[in-house]
Image: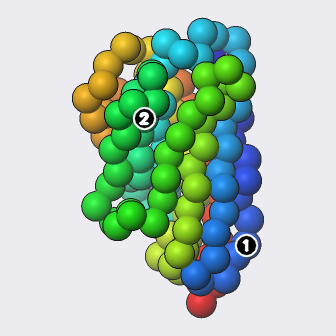
């Protein structure tokens, strides 16, 4: 499967962005999906993930209820709604896919098989 992330940009603190990840070339509904981010000069970190049905979602502690992951299998896309953004949310955001019919949390980057190219989110103070 190929993944294409979009929706990043420059936003002021407190603002919102909706990130999208479009999939192609696979049976999207069979993939567990995740969002990761890599802040400048730091390691890539888990943000959120969603099971193949969309019925199970997981978030990193730093999200604190500000982000929402969702998916539309008919559109072959996964989304990350980011609200109340903070300057420390500045990062390149990546979507990732793992071919698995699982519902448990998958937070380790090395367990995902496919990655999008990333979209840059910059939050100004």
Instruction: Say above or below: 44 vs 13.
Output: above
Which residue occupies 71% across, 25% down?
Answer: 75
Left or right: residue 35 compared with residue 22: left
Distance from disc 2 to disc 1, alpha carbons, whole Å, reads 26 Å
Left or right: residue 34 compared with residue 123: left
Q: In the picture, residue 9 is in which quadrant?
A: bottom right
Local SS, label 2: strand
In the picture, the disc for residue 50 is: 2
Check the image and name the residue furthest to the front. Answer: 55
* Image quarter in which the C terminus is found: bottom right
Instruction: Say above or below: 52 vs 5.
Output: above
* Image quarter in which the N terminus is found: top right
Which of the two discs, 2 and 1, labels the residue nearer the N terminus? 1
> Mark 1 highlights which residue?
10
Q: How did the renderer colour the structure?
A: rainbow
Local SS, label 1: strand
Q: Position of residue 110 (x, y in %)?
A: 35, 31
Q: Can see residue 30?
A: yes
In the picture, the disc for residue 60 is: none
Which residue occupies 50% across, 70% down?
Answer: 89
Q: Can see residue 116?
A: no
């Amino acid at each position: 499967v190929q993944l294409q992330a979009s929706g990043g940009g420059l936003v002021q603190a407190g603002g919102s962005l909706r990130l999208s990840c479009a999939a192609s070339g696979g049976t999207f509904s069979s993939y567990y999906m995740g969002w990761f981010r890599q802040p400048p000069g730091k390691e890539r970190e888990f943000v959120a993930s969603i099971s193949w049905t969309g019925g199970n979602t997981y978030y990193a502690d730093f999200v604190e209820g500000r982000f929402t992951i969702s998916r539309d299998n008919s559109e072959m896309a996964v989304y990350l709604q980011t609200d109340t953004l903070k300057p420390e949310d500045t990062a390149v955001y990546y979507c990732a896919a793992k071919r698995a019919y699982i519902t448990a949390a998958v937070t380790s980057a090395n367990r995902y098989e496919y990655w999008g190219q990333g979209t840059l989110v910059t939050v100004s103070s």
